[in-house]
Amino acid sequence: MASGEIMRLLFVLLLACMGLWSSAQSIRGRLLADGQPIGMGNILIYAQKDSIRPLVLLVTDSIGQFQATLPMPGTYTLKTALIGYKPISRVIEVNTDLDLGDLSLQLNTRTMQEITVTGKKKLIQKTSTGFVVASDAILTQAAGTATDLLANIPTILVDGEGAITIRGKAPTILVNGRNSNLTANLDRIPASAIERIEVINNPGARYDADGEGGIINIVLKKNTAAGTNGAFALGAGMGAKERLSSSFMLNHKAGGVNLGMNYDNRYARRTRNVNTQRETYDLDQGHFLDQQRTDNRTEQTHNVKLNADYTGKKDELSFEGIFGYENTRNNEPLYTRSYYKDRSFDYGNLRTSDENPFERNWEGNLNYNRKFANNRKTLSSNISYAFGNEEENTLITTAPIDEKGEVIGTDYIQRTRNKELTHLAQGRIDYGFPVSARATVETGYKGILRRVNADFLNAYEQNGQLIPDPLFSNVFDFREQIHAVYGTYKSSLGASKALKYELGLRLEQMNNTGQSSNPDTTFRNAFLNFFPSLNMGYKLKDGSMVSFNLGRRINRAGLWQINPFIDITDSLNRRGGNPNLKPELVNTVELGFSHDWRQVGVTAKAFYRRGTNTILSYTVLLPGGIAFTQPQNIGSSTTYGVESFITASAGKWWSSTASISLYNQSIEGDVDGENINSSLFSWYVKWANTFNFFQSTRAQLLFNYQAPTALPQGRRIAVYNVDLGFQQKIMQGRARLGLTVTDVFNTLENGSTVVTPDFKSTRISKSDTRAVLLTFAMTFGSAFREKLMDNKFSAE
């Protein structure tokens, strides 16, 4: 079906939905405690004659706001439910749209030290722009990092190299709503530090336009309970080798001032085996290549987070500081054997890389919010600065071997050093105000300044001295500025306001410059892009929601994609960046439907995306049998499909969330005159089952399967695994024991096959993903035991 026909069909369906008018009424408000907005708070609305089954269940957003549409005018009962605070119960008369204003919670001091949570947790909380997953809802990753947590969240895929995609495309990843150096390696963030993951499939104009896959926002934990509160956790486990972890949280809140500190560390040793097979068609010598690599890695990380918050009657001010340190040691022996076309032995070598990288990062972030009597009026600002210092020193020893792998000659020694300094500064201001009883306008500005200096030195030993190799040494200096302004208009149509819509426009000016010493090049780019968006939602009489979204996104090349220096860790399989990359522009269309019954909920979405200047990795064969991989702009790409997640429960003892995505991805274009046409239907499913055996005992079984996916020159293999998690509360709920078994059947591996007119290559990677992990966590002085003890041990 042509894209024009798809667009016409979607608009016809939208118009049909707009015709289904009802007599619904809208209510809204904001939940506060000590003058501070409360996110993830529960709002329950009951019909007058039914005080058992809630008619509407809401979850407040990150600034405490909630909004709902009731089926008809009448009398209702609104209740709040939040651990540690006295519940609010209010009878409301709804005849027209109603603004409840601020609902202020009071601390329940009588039960402050005794409250524990015994109810089951939902894996998914739906929002108007996507969904939210609380980290503690995924028991099987109580022993994971941020990467592990994302791999088990519906609609998100994580490959064997840690690349993250949604619907086959990369999203923008934020930390606490801002760009962060921490996202360069998400294994730095343990699951113990994460409060929740927010997935925004259709960002409006308020959000960055970067990332075709949408936005993933990682929200870190911060306790705000009154008094002095804390938690600590210890963990130990064994995969192929040992893993240890610990964490500690502490906060003190008095009046409008809150001070907090979080610390976590992890120590892990792991192994990975990588096998590569390549056949080069036109060569006799070097026709078959067989490589076997083993990684033996030791990792140690430390993270400290400090926060200071002030909440006044009209002003809210908060500061957050994060310091992270990572030290790694990795030994990689790589056996390479080359064979003639008749399978007779040609040559072989053993290339051993002894890597010792370390990294230090720190970030400072300052937020300000202004409160107004009219809660539809908002003003917020943010400024942050992040600095990263990374260095890696590697000793590479290469020795010839015979067919059996025995060393038969002298060593050739190389030493490399890679130093990288990263500066990231950003600031933003957002202002929203009502223009009528129905309509609100939001506008704002965001600026990002980034500078990276990378100094890569390669040298070889000769007569006991190190001789720099200018061919593989490089200094790369990169600077980037992004300035964006946006405006959105939110309103509703019809007497019942059942149809709500948001129109937005974002303008982004991006300027970057780069200078490289090898090759001696300087590049400069400037792009001005417009990003319109339309988000619409219509609520039917039975509570179902139909949504329609139009938007435009951009994929900008990352630093590693444009840095021209060449990685020679594997001399026969090299990688480098491409400073000539253009940004990829993507137009998106989505139609969705959602409905919740008493024990079953269904959300389904159909989507279509068309991209130009598509950025993908492309491999060519160089003289000497060297495969060189570099990102390229490869024509256009089209992705269309459907995705859905279904939630179900049976009483209090079992709940299930299953997500499935089916899509077709095609690539059309050329690289250096070589025609590229690739199309593949793919799908993946994630299924989480949570069992509440007793009041204080929970278990979870999680299954993941990803079918083969398309590459420009081949495809990735299928990936699947099963994880198991168990938790038992002890000491009257003040402590918890956790047991996790990851990759129960040891099936998780990653790989790909690349096919070109010159060669065929297959690469399979298998890490020690099966592990058994035990944790112990305990709180003191806090009613929020569930929140403080969740995910306190990092597996990797």
Image (spheres, rainbow, N blue to C red):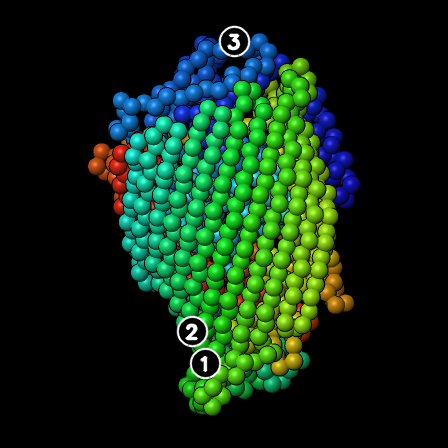
- Identify the residue under disc 1: 397
Residue 93, numbered circle? 3
Pointers 1 and 2 in contact (C-beta within 8 Å): yes
Q: Inspect the image, locate mark 1, and give the three-letter code of the amino acid beneath it.
A: Thr
Q: Which badge, 2 or 3, is on the more N-terminal residue?
A: 3
Q: For label 3, count other residues whose C-alpha is less than 10 Å away and answer few (under 14), some (14-19) or many (20+).
A: few
Q: Inspect the image, locate mark 2, and give the three-letter code of the amino acid beneath it.
A: Asp
- Identify the residue under disc 2: 354
Q: Which badge, 1 or 2, is on the more N-terminal residue?
A: 2
Q: Inspect the image, locate mark 3, and give the three-letter code of the amino acid beneath it.
A: Glu
| Residue 617 seen from this side | no
Image height check: is 69 above or below 333?
Answer: above
Q: Which badge, 1 or 3, is on the more N-terminal residue?
A: 3
Instruction: Choose mark 2 or mark 3, whichever is in front.
Output: 2
Residue at mark 2 to residue at mark 3: CA–CA distance = 71 Å
Label 3 SS: strand
